[in-house]
Image (tube, rainbow, N blue to C red):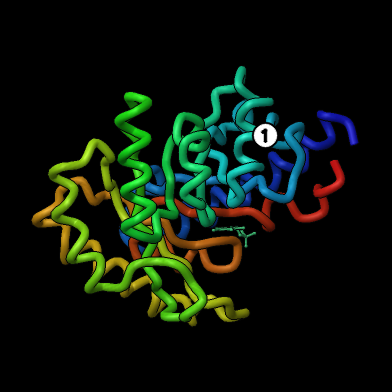
Amino acid sequence: MTDSELKAILTERLATVRSRIAVASRRAGREPDKVTLVAVTKTVSTRVASLLPELGVPDLGESRPQELWRKAEALRAFPIRWHMIGHLQRNKVERTLPLSYLIHSVDSARLLDEIETQARKQNLRPQVLLQINASHEDQKHGFDAEELAAILPRQETLTVKIVGLMGMAALSPDPEQARHAFGGLKAMIDKHRGEHASLTQLSMGMSGDYEVAIEEGGTLVRVGSTLFEGLEGE
Ligand SMILES: *Cc1c(COP(=O)(O)O)cnc(C)c1O
């Protein structure tokens, strides 16, 4: 496919996603521009990713650190904000930190400690989200309500800025199944915002459930397959 054919496909798909974001926002009485679309480029090439900023999407997400390094380094010249959205091993923090605009997936106190150590070493002020185990599936990473309450007060001593929460609903073909999990995340952030005013961002919603996430108060939606299906070979 040529670049212009690719751009035509992406333009059309982005228009659909944007209009759905707008409709879901209005349904919830929210401003559509309060929702940031993070295009999850994990299944597509650097070339496809490189077309997104000029189509108005500067926020790109990757779930594997090595893939984020590879794309971020190849696309250094592009105005892209990289979002680390998947599990981050502590030994990969050093290299991931300077390349990332926002790390969504801080899922343990030990990982937060390592990010803090590297932030000080590299003189960075990273922004992070704490990942919540919203679906209560044991194999999922993240903090529960009690662990969150215990870790938030540490914000005061940190260079790292905790700007919100991230969560995933259990996989289900029915987006309404996600509503309960998303509503729980919203209640959790609201509960702590009084004391921790920096908690403004709620990363929730993927291709199958981003409209429900917006209705429930999500501010960052992470959308991959709806945008990139069929473009994996390009
Ligand atoms: C892959 C991925 C997404 C995007 O999922 P789609 O269903 O393809 O939109 C969102 N969040 C995380 C953490 C992911 O790994």
Quarter of the rendering containing residue 172: bottom right
Q: Where in the figure is residue 149, as x and y percent of width and height? A: 18, 66
Image quadrant occupied by the C terminus: top right
- Quadrant of the picture in which ligand 1 is shown: bottom right
User: Residue 31 or 48: which is nearer the viewer?
Assistant: 48
Q: Is residue 121 left or right of residue 221?
A: left
Q: Residue at x 82, y 29 (%)?
A: 3
- The answer to whether residue 27 of the structure is visible from this angle is no
Q: Is residue 58 left or right of residue 2?
A: left
Q: Which residue is mark 1?
A: 70
**Other residues around mark 1 within 10 Å, as few (<14) / some (14–19) / many (≥20):** few
Q: Is residue 95 above or below residue 195?
A: above
- The answer to whether residue 134 of the structure is visible from this angle is yes
Q: Where in the figure is residue 140, as x and y percent of width and height? A: 49, 72
User: Residue 78 or 34: which is nearer the viewer?
Assistant: 78
Image quadrant occupied by the N terminus: top right
Give the amino acid type for the residue marked by disc 1 in the picture. Answer: Arg
Q: Residue at x 34, y 61 (%)?
A: 217
Q: Is residue 44 left or right of residue 141?
A: right
Q: Residue at x 52, y 46 (%)?
A: 38
Q: Is residue 22 above or below residue 170?
A: above
Q: Helix or strand or loop: what does disc 1 sit on?
A: helix
